Structures are given as structure tokens and as C-alpha cells.
Image (cartoon, rainbow, N blue to C red):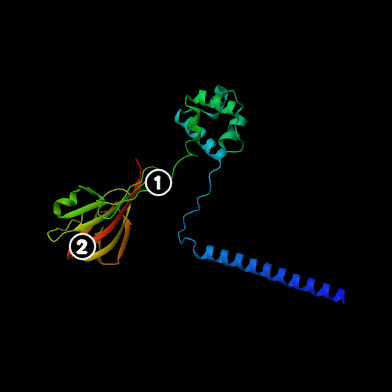
Amino acid sequence: MATTKLSSKMLRARTHARRRTASARAHSGHAATSADTYATGSNAPTTGELQLEISIGRRVRLLRQRLQLTATELATEAGLSPGMLSKIENGGTSPSLSTLQGLARALNVPMTSFFADFEERRDCSYVRAGQGVLIERRGTKSGHRYELLGHSISGDIVVEPYLITLSEDAEPYALFQHDGVEFIYMLSGKVIYRHADKLYPMSAGDALFFDAGAPHGPEELLERPMTYLSIIIYPRA
């Protein structure tokens, strides 16, 4: 009888354990599904955490190239073998403090400069409603109002998001031309927008993305006032 009771207790314990395991697996699966569901739709590569060795290596190579030194020349000045310098620049080894000191002396920079990329902060620009910076451009003379909504602080790419308002007395102007690409999203009003030799009717909700090197701008103002979001992207000089 005692054996029967013990077996029943063991059976119940095993049943509870299986239920807890199944629940944990289901929860884990649900979490994974949720993560997949909320993944971004962008094709931009994922930015992983930059390893310190790789960050230092990139910085050493950049500083060397700025001074127009060959790897052999820098290695000699820093008291390293060319092979060791190659490993450092490729992030294949973690250089000692004495090695970094020798490189800093050879490159004539402070040791802290090797950690600049690793400690780099990610940009963020916050602008409250109605507090964008008003920009004077050629179009403002024709009733075009440009309100800069943010700016990129660093990096190789400049992004300029504008809220553009065309007033009741605005005039058409389709000769804008500049480097980079531009994205336009209509918020209100109606316009015939020109890009190169093509015309596009645009109203609230319509979007246009184009090479800004070709002449472009509002060709016909059909319904004023009008507002649209303009995002200009170009390489930093």
C-alpha cells in the first residue's frame, strides 16, 4: 500500500514537472514569435556591439593612413613586428598598454584616441512641435517656408528633415538641384511636382523619392496652403 501511495506521489510530481516544462517552452516560443513579429522591416544590417579590439584596430589603421605611413614604417617606429601590427589593425589581438603607448608615440596622438570609436555616442535629435529651425533658402522668397526638424551630428551621411509650408501667395519653383537623394511626403494641399522631365500629381498621403541631382520642385500649386515633409540625404563633405 505504501508503495502504491509513493508511486502515485511520484506520478503526480512528474506530471507537474512536465506541465511546467511545457509551459516554459510555450512561453519561450511565444517570446520568440513576438520578437520575430516586431522585427523591423528595413533591410539595413543589424548593428552589433563593436568589439574593443576591432575598434582599436580600425583607429590605428585610420591614423596611420592619415599620416601616409606604411604598415612597416609604423611597426618600426612603434617597436613592433609588421605581423603584430597587422593583427592589431585587423582586430585579431588585444594590444597591451605598452604596445598602445608605443603606437601612440609613433602616431603622435594621445592613447585615448584609440578608444574614440568604441566610446562614440549614437546621435539623437529631438525637436518639439513648432520649434524647428527656420531656414532661409531660395524658395522662401516665393512663399516657401522651411522648418528644419532635426540634424545629424556626425557620421559620413547628412540627413536634413524639413517641414515645408507653401502659403497662399506661394509661387511655383521647379529648379531646385543639389547633391544626394530626397524623399517627399505630402501632408496637406495638392501640387504637381516636377522631377527632371516628369510631372507627378501629389496630395495628402502621396510620396516621392528621387535623385536630387536633377531639377525638381513644385511645378503647379493646385491647392494652397500645402505642407509636406522633405528629407534630404547626402554625403558629408
Residue 10 in the figure: left or right of residue 97: right
Q: Residue at x 54, y 29 (%)?
A: 71
Name the spot of residue 153 as percent of width and height, x first. 36, 43
Residue 145 in the figure: left or right of residue 123: left
Q: Residue at x 57, y 67 (%)?
A: 30
Q: Is residue 15 or residue 226 the one in the foreground? A: 15
* Quadrant for the N terminus in the image: bottom right
Q: Which secondary structure, mark 1?
A: loop
Name the spot of residue 50 as percent of width and height, x first. 53, 44
Please state which of the two labelled residues, at mark 2 or mark 1, is closer to the viewer: 1
The disc, 2 or 1, on the residue closer to the chain's N-terminal end is: 1
**Quarter assignment of residue 226:** bottom left
User: Mark 1 and mark 2 in contact (Cβ < 8 Å)?
Assistant: no
What kind of residue is marked 1? Asp
Q: How many marks?
A: 2
Query: Could you say which disc has been placed on residue 123 in the image?
Result: 1
Q: Which secondary structure, mark 2?
A: strand
Q: Is residue 211 or residue 187 the one in the foreground? A: 187
Residue 129 shows up from this direction: yes
What kind of residue is marked 2? Met
**Quarter assignment of residue 154:** top left
Q: Is residue 149 or residue 69 the one in the foreground? A: 149
Q: Which residue is mark 2?
A: 226
Q: Is residue 102 depicted above or below 148 in this figure?
A: above
Name the spot of residue 100 as percent of width and height, x first. 56, 28
Q: Is residue 6 depicted above or below 112 in this figure?
A: below
Give the distance between the C-alpha atoms of the residues marked 2 and 1, in whole angstroms: 31 Å
Residue that extends furthest to the front in the rendered view of this protein: 2
Name the spot of residue 43 as percent of width and height, x first. 47, 58
* Quadrant for the C terminus in the image: top left
Q: Is residue 117 depicted above or below 182 in this figure?
A: above
